[in-house]
Image (cartoon, rainbow, N blue to C red):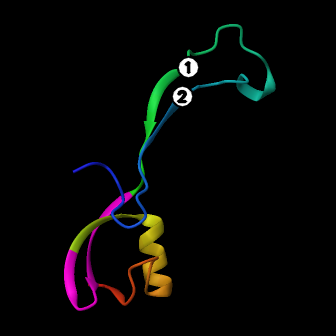
Amino acid sequence: MSYTCEICGKEGSVGTSQKHRRGVAGKRWKKRAQATPRSFKPNLQRVTLKISGEVRKMRICSKCLKRIRKYGSVRNYSNVVVA
């Protein structure tokens, strides 16, 4: 199973980490840390949801979980209850 939200399809992305890019306290450092590759992952939560009377365990991102708790539904999933 990939690291993907089952509702919105949010996936991880790749970027670079750069420490002390502009130096500390606004001054420039001569030797800066190299930009190294890193991955950004969505904040997935394993939740038991009740969708149209059917209980399902899903891995969803925290943003979708907040929407479900606030509105009771997300996109194509209506009548969702956090069990």
| Residue 50 found in image quarter | bottom left
Instruction: Tell me the number on the disc at residue 35.
Output: 1
Q: Say few, some or many: other residues with alpha carbon within 10 Å of mark 1 (under 14 / 14 to 19 / 20 or more).
A: few
Question: Which range of residues does the magenta coloring cover?
Answer: 44-56
Q: Name the residue at 71% across, 7% down.
A: 30
Q: Do the CB atoms of the residues marked 2 and 1 lie less than 8 Å apart? A: yes
Q: Is residue 81 above or below residue 67?
A: below
Q: Is residue 2 above or below residue 23?
A: below
Residue 40 lies in the magenta stretch: no
Tag 2: residue type? Ser
Amino acid type, callout 1: Ala
Instruction: Give residue 11's position: percent from left, percent from top.
Output: 41, 49
Q: Residue furthest right?
A: 26
**Residue 49 location (% of width, % of height):** 27, 79
Q: Which residue is found at the position 53% from the left and 28% from the top? A: 16
Mark 2 or mark 1, which has the lower sequence index? 2
Find disc 2 in the rendering and name its residue: 17
- What element does badge 1 sit on? loop
